[in-house]
């Protein structure tokens, strides 16, 4: 059975592709989850037009995110935390705290876009990764200092 994918399906295909799948897979998974439609000429034409409009929107968003990532490459943020004398902080630095600090500096960053390798539980300078949509990434420097 030929179907046209409405969205990317991991291991199957990308949005807008016409693929052959078994009737059971289409009927039991793709159609109920609204991920594909039966491939007819009218549907293909309509869905491809919709995908073109979506691509234009995505390209604008991608340009914005690339510009933001370039600006973030030179950003350094500082977060003050209560700490012991040996440099260990009470609690840890969270993704939300990092995102809030970046928002204060004028960037559009959500806590879900902050990619920490592990919990930050010590004072010092760290490199923190940011992962945006469209596989765009940036790194910032984070200084964790002792609150007085």
Image (cartoon, grey):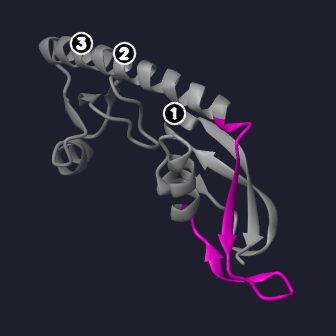
Marks 1 and 3 sit apart, C-alpha to C-alpha, by 21 Å
Which residue bears the numbered disc 3?
49
Residue at the location (70% across, 42% down)?
75
Where residue 110 sits: x, y (%)?
46, 51
**Residue 119 in sight:** no
Q: Is residue 69 left or right of residue 120?
A: left
Magenta residues span 72-95
The answer to which of 2 and 69 lies nearer the viewer is 69
- What label does residue 96 carry, if any? none
Quadrant hosting residue 114: bottom right
User: Which type of secondary structure does the marked residue at label 1 adopt?
Assistant: helix
The answer to whether residue 122 is above or below residue 49 is below
Where residue 57 sits: x, y (%)?
35, 21
User: Which type of secondary structure does the marked residue at label 2 adopt?
Assistant: helix
Marks 2 and 1 sit apart, C-alpha to C-alpha, by 14 Å
- What label does residue 134 carry, if any? 1
Where residue 93 sits: x, y (%)?
63, 71
Q: Is residue 84 left or right of residue 117?
A: right
Which residue bears the numbered disc 2?
56
Farthest-out residue, left: 42
Q: Are marks 2 and 1 in contact (CB under 8 Å)?
A: no
* Residue 75 within the segment the image draws in magenta: yes
Q: Earlier in the sequence, mark 2 or mark 1?
A: 2
């Amino acid at each position: 059975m030929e179907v046209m994918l409405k969205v990317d399906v991991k291991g199957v295909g990308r949005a807008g592709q016409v693929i052959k799948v078994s009737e059971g897979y289409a009927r039991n998974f793709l159609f109920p989850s609204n991920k594909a439609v039966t491939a007819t000429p009218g549907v293909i034409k309509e869905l491809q037009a919709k995908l073109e409009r979506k691509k234009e929107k995505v390209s604008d968003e991608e340009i914005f995110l690339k510009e933001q990532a370039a600006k973030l490459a030179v950003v350094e943020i500082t977060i003050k935390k209560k700490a012991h004398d040996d440099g260990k902080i009470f609690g840890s630095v969270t993704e939300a705290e990092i995102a809030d600090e970046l928002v204060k500096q004028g960037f559009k960053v959500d806590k879900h876009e902050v990619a920490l390798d592990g919990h930050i539980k010590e004072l010092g300078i760290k490199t923190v990764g940011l992962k945006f949509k469209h596989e765009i990434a940036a790194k910032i420097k984070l200084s964790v200092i002792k609150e007085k």
